[in-house]
Image: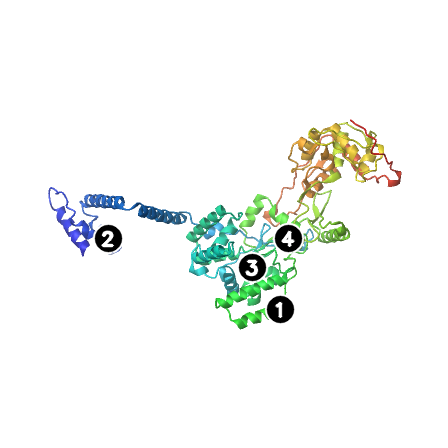
Amino acid sequence: MHCHYVCYEAWQWEHLAPVPDISFSYIPLLYRTTTICNILFFIGTIRKAPIVKLVMIKITKHISKNIKQKWQQTKPKYKFILSFVLLCLSIRALPLFAPIRPQDIAQNQQTLEFIDRNGLPLGTILTRDQENTVVVPLEQISPLFINAIIAAEDKRYYQHGALDIKAIGRSLLEAIQAKQIVSGASTITMQLARMLEPTPRTFGNKIREIWLSWRITAGMNKNQILQAYINRLPMGGNIYGVEAASRAYFGISATDLNLAQATILAALPNDPTDLNPYYNWSLLKQRQIHILKRMVEDNYITSAEAEKVLAEKITLQPKNQGIIAAPHFLFWLSQNQSTAINQNLSTTTTPTVIRTTIDRPLQQFVTTQVQQVIQNITPYNVHHAAAIVINNQTGEVLAYVGSPDYFNTQKMGSNDGVQALRQPGSTLKPFLYQLALENQVINPNTILPDVPTYYAIPGAKLYSPTNYNQDKFLGPVIVRVALANSLNIPAVRVLEKVGVEQFLNRLHQLGFKHLQASPEHYGLGLSLGSGEVSLWELAKAYLIMARQGEVIPVVTTIPSKTSPLFQQKKSQDISLLPQAESKWMLIVNMLSDSPTPPLKTATLSKNYHKLN
C-alpha cells in the first residue's frame, strides 16, 4: 500500500512544470515497507517515469547520509564487532567466486592390460600411475559401504557444511580438558581437500585446507563430494578407492559388497599401512568392531546384524592385485610412456593392451633367483636385490625385477631397486679403463702399483683407498690384472691420470644423468663408486659396452601394426662414441679373465708407503 502511494505521487510530479524541489516526506513510507518484494515492486513501477533518476538519487543520498550519521553515533566496540562480522562474511563468501567443480578434480582413469612379448598376460594396472584405482559413480557403490564410511569418518556429514562446528567445539573442549589433542574434527570434505593437496599438518596448512574445503562446497553437492572422496580413499599399498580395493581384496565389484566386506574396507583408510589385511588382520578386525558399533549407534544396523558380521568368515584374494609378473616394470612403464601415448590413452574408453618386451618365463626365473639369493644372505642383514636383463642385439628388456617381493609392504617391496639410486662400487671401473685406453693414458701392458697409497686432500684426512680384501695387495700389476681383479688402488691411479672431470663427462655420455655434482664433489673416489646411479643407467651403459661403443635406445614395448597408439619410429638414432670400437672389445676381453687366485697374491705390509 505504501509503495502504491509513493508511485502515485511520482506520477503526479511528472505532470508538474517546472519540477519543484521534491520533499522527502514520503521516505519514511519506504522505510516502513516490510518485505523485499514490496521494494522491488516499487522500483519496477517507477523506473519508467522520467523523474525516476532524480528520485533515486535523492533517496540514495538520504539513505547514505542517515547511515553515515548512525555509524558516527555508534560506539567503538560495536563498530569493531560489526566490522569483524562483515569481514568474516566477506571471507566466507570468497569461495563462491572460485568454486571447485567435479570436472576440476576428475580422475583420468584408464585401464592398461600388459602382455609379454609372446602374448602371455603379465597383469592389469588400473591407472597410468602408482595409484591403483578405479573411478565409479556413487550409484555403483554398495550403500552398506557408504553408511560404514560415513559412520566411521563423519557421522553428521549430511547435516553440516564444509566444517562441523559441533565437532570442532567438542574437540577443543576435549583438548583443553586433557591438555593434548584427543580427537580430530576433520570432515569428509576436509579430508578430500587434504587428498587433493597433501601437505604437512601445520596450522597454516590447516587454514589452507579449510579454504579448499569451502571452495569444494561452493562448487559441488554432498553426493559429488562423497563420490570424489570414496574414489580416493587410501586402501593399503598402492590401492586407492573402494572399487579397486574391492577387486583387489575380494575379487568383486564395490556394488556387490556385503556388510562384513564393506566394514573391513571402511576400516582401512584410518591407517592403511598398519591395518594391511594380509599382515595385520587382528588389528583390522578391531577397527571393524569399532565401525560396527558406530553403525549400531547411528541406526544403520542392529546389534544382531553386527554380531553376525563378526562371526562371518572373510576370504581374501591372493595379494598380487591382478599382476602375474614384473609388477615393478609394469608400474614403471605405465608412468614413463611418451606424452603422445598418454594423451591418447586418456581419451580411450576401452582397456588398452600393451605388448611389452618382457619374456614371462625368463622374468619368473630371474625373480626366483633373486629370492633365493636374498634368502641365502639374509643372515648378513641383506633383504633387497634387483636385476635387469637386456638383449644386447636389440636393446629389449627381457626381465625386470625391482625387489624380491613387490607385495611385501612390511619390507617396502614396492620400492624399485632398478630405478633407485645407489653407489655402484666397482662397476664403473671398466668405463674408466676404456677411457684411459682411448686417450692413450695407459695401454694393456702398463704396470700399475697395487700398494698402500695415500692422497693428501685439502681440509680433510689423508685419503687411503684399500682393496676389498683389506690387507691383500698384488704389488706391480699390468692393466689386465688390475681390471680382472677389480683392484681399487690401480683404478684410483688411472683416474688421477685421466682426470675426474673428463671421466665424469664420459659417464654423462654413457647416460648416467644422476651424476650432476661437480668433479670436486666426487674426487678420486668416483672410480670406486662415490656417486649415486641407478641399475637402469648401469645396464644401459653396459649395453653400450656390449655393442662396442654403439649407443642404441633401450626398448620396453613392441609396436603393434593394428594399434596406432604404439606406432614408434622404426629408425632409431644410433651414435658411436669416438674412437671406441677396438678399445671396447679390449675391455670386454679383459673382463672375461678370471681373478688372480688368492694363493698367488702378495701380502705387503701397510708400513710400506708409496707417496705420489
Label 3 to label 4: alpha-carbon separation: 20 Å
Circle 4 residue: 114
Label 1 vs 3, first from the N-terminus? 3
**x 64%, y 53%: residue:** 114
Q: The residue under label 3 is which amino acid type?
A: Glu
Location of the C terminus by quadrant is: top right
Q: Are marks 3 and 2 in contact (CB under 8 Å)?
A: no
Above or below, comparing residue 295 to residue 561 in the picture? below
What is the distance, in whole Å, between disc 1 and disc 3 at their CAs? 21 Å
Q: Name the residue at the left extreme.
A: 17
Circle 4 — which element?
strand
1 or 2: tag closer to the N-terminus: 2
Location of residue 29 in the rendering, given as x and y in whole percent from the top left corner? 18, 52
Looking at the picture, tell me which residue is in the foreground, 530 or 252. 530
In the rendered structure, find residue 39 and report the number of the disc placed on it: 2
Q: Earlier in the sequence, mark 3 or mark 2?
A: 2
